[in-house]
Image: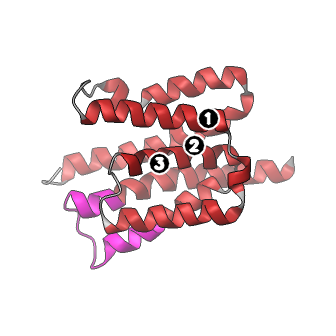
Amino acid sequence: MVELLSTIPLLLINSLLFGFFTKLADLLDEHGLKMFKGADIFFGFVWGIFGTLAIIFSPLLATFYLAMLINWIIRGRIDYLNHRIATAIILVSVFFSGILANLDQILFIITTTLFTGIGVLIDYKIIKRNFLTNNNLFIFIALVIMIYSNLNYWIVFVSYLLNSIAYQSVKTWGKRNLKNY
């Protein structure tokens, strides 16, 4: 129990940093943020490292973030070198950690289906972006429902909430401060 309690703060910090560096890497190559030469590549590595640190704590988190990554791959969101670096680091970590044997099939199917299904509907302009889709609230609703069937899903909810807060904070900063956003 003590070991679990000592890892939860690390997990929460990694979840925040995973979201932060995911969007920071995006700002560097897509939205004109300038930091230093090679920053986009550097932060692609950092994003991949913190993504790996977030998923190795729990097969449930590995399942959830792997499903999110599969969605990004299917929808063509891994479109810059730093995205591919982060993706490769995370995928290699998933494959070599042995965590694949413990993936939660229900969580994987629900998460992949929701992220990809709603994402494709938006991409093909079948539905319009709105508050629910811009903030991925549909995933949070699904996770709350899933928590009622299995309390272990709370860690996925909290991790993704922190990840999203960090991601959306960097995104908001980028919209306010970058001309290319």
Please tell me whether mark 3 sits on a helix, a strand or a loop: helix
Name the amino acid, label 3.
Ile
**Label 3 with label 1: CB-CB less than 8 Å:** no
Which residue sits at x=48%, y=45%? Answer: 68
Residue 95 drawn above or below residue 181: below
Residue, disc 2: 64
Q: Which is the main secondary structure of the residues drawn in magenta? A: helix
Q: Tag 1 or tag 3, which sits nearer the N-term?
A: 3
Residue, disc 3: 70
Q: Which mark is residue 11?
A: none
Residue 105 percent coordinates (x, y)? 65, 37
Residue 57 drawn above or below residue 155: below
Q: Tag 1 or tag 2, which sits nearer the N-term?
A: 2
Specify start and end residues of the magenta stretch as a single range: 25-46
Which residue sits at x=70%, y=49%? Answer: 58
Whether residue 49 can be seen here? no
Quarter holding residue 31: bottom left
**Label 2 with label 1: CB-CB less than 8 Å:** yes
> As drawn, is 11 to the left or to the right of 65?
right
Mark pair 3, 1: CA separation:
13 Å
Residue, disc 1: 107
Which residue sits at x=44%, y=47%? Answer: 166
Tell whether position 13 is magenta. no
Q: What is the number of callouts on the image?
A: 3
